[in-house]
């Protein structure tokens, strides 16, 4: 190659050099007028459209994956299909986000593991937001909370024949209580029974009824919304809700910390509340008197 170049005239070399420079210029078009050409700024830039795409709020494009358990009347299955207040609520939100809603059955004691790993986008299942985990950590320290939307209390389900035996929290000391593992009820149960008592951790709230019915436990601590669905009815007609008043709690939705999804869902929740759509489904499931939207909660 060197020998070939050495035989070329200065004019020929100049023409070749001009051709090469022209080709390079064509391959690197001039940025439009007003474009920021600072290297660092352009490398990290995203458009508003990209940043605000609802699909990017979730871990799976086109889907909103929610962690749930069987919890009537919030999320439960009929003929293989999910239904309930939280189910219909979530479907309305998913529709406005333009996302398919998928209900993922989870182990409630692992709900924060599922959330932090990205396996689910939110905990949406009659989630008591004002509770602590069994180790004492406030749930609000482990996830970002939405506005609260329903009032709840814990209740003590007992055998109906023991109604006179359990009339105050003090009566639970030294007893055996059943509760769903990882639930707000499990945390309270340990406090109620004290060092001399015992807590049986069940896979879900429904399973705690059987613990009471069979005599394995003296009672079960269960969300009042669920207890009212089953205690004293059908297979559990021999069970009752003890006359023990417990503090009011609230339900909210749990999101990964720092997730923009929480704010988008809050916006839609407020719209659905103002339009009366949340009241419609709350009435359908007998929860109208518990529907209270608090826009200051979780902020």
Image (cartoon, rainbow, N blue to C red):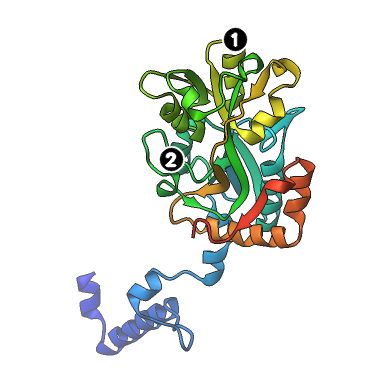
Residue positioned 38% across, 81% down in the render:
37
Which is more toward the observer, 4 or 40?
Answer: 40
| Residue at the (75%, 61%) spot, across then down | 275
Q: Residue at x 46, y 88 (%)?
A: 34
How far is mark 1 from mark 2, CA to CA?
Answer: 29 Å
* Near-viewer residue (298 or 259): 298
In the rendered structure, the answer to whether residue 20 lies left or right of residue 98 reads left
Q: Residue 62, percent across and down? A: 62, 50
Identify the residue position indicated by label 2 in the image: 132
Looking at the picture, how far across and down is residue 264, in whole percent? 58, 60
Locate residue 70 relative to residue 60 in the image: left or right. right
Give whichever of discs 1 and 2 has the lower sequence position.
2
Residue 204 visible to the viewer:
no
Secondary structure beneath dot 1 equals: loop
Q: Quadrant of residue 207?
A: top right
Do the numbered discs 1 and 2 sit on residues whose CB atoms are within 8 Å? no
Q: Quadrant of residue 36?
A: bottom left
Which residue in the structure is indicated by mark 1?
214
Please tell me whether residue 160 is drawn above or below residue 70 in the rendered image: above
In this image, 203 relative to 22: left or right?
right
């Amino acid at each position: 190659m060197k020998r070939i170049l050495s035989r070329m005239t200065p004019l020929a070399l100049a023409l070749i050099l001009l051709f090469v420079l022209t080709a390079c210029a064509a391959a690197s078009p001039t940025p439009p007028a007003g474009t920021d050409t600072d290297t660092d700024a352009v490398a990290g830039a995203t458009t508003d459209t990209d940043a605000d795409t609802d699909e990017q709020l979730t871990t799976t494009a086109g889907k909103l994956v929610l962690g749930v358990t069987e919890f009537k009347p919030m999320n439960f299955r009929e003929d293989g299909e999910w239904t309930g207040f939280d189910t219909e609520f979530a479907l309305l939100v998913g529709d406005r986000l333009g996302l398919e809603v998928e209900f993922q059955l989870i182990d409630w004691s692992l709900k924060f593991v599922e959330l932090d790993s990205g396996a689910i986008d939110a905990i949406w299942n009659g989630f008591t937001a004002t509770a602590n985990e069994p180790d004492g950590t406030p749930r609000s320290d482990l996830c970002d909370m939405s506005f609260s939307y329903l009032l709840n209390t814990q209740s003590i389900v007992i055998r109906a024949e023991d109604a006179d035996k359990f009339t105050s929290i003090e009566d639970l000391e030294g007893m055996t209580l059943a509760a769903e593992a990882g639930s707000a009820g499990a945390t309270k149960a340990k406090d109620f029974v004290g060092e001399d008592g015992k807590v049986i951790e069940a896979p879900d709230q429904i399973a705690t009824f059987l613990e009471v019915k069979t005599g394995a436990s003296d009672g079960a601590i269960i969300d009042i919304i669920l207890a009212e669905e089953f205690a004293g009815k059908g297979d559990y007609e021999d069970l009752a809700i003890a006359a023990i008043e417990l503090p009011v709690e609230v339900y909210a939705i749990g999101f990964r910390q720092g997730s923009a999804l929480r704010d988008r869902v809050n916006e839609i929740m407020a719209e659905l509340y103002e339009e009366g759509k949340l009241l419609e489904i709350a009435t359908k499931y007998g929860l109208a008197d518990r529907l209270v939207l608090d826009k200051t909660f979780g902020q």
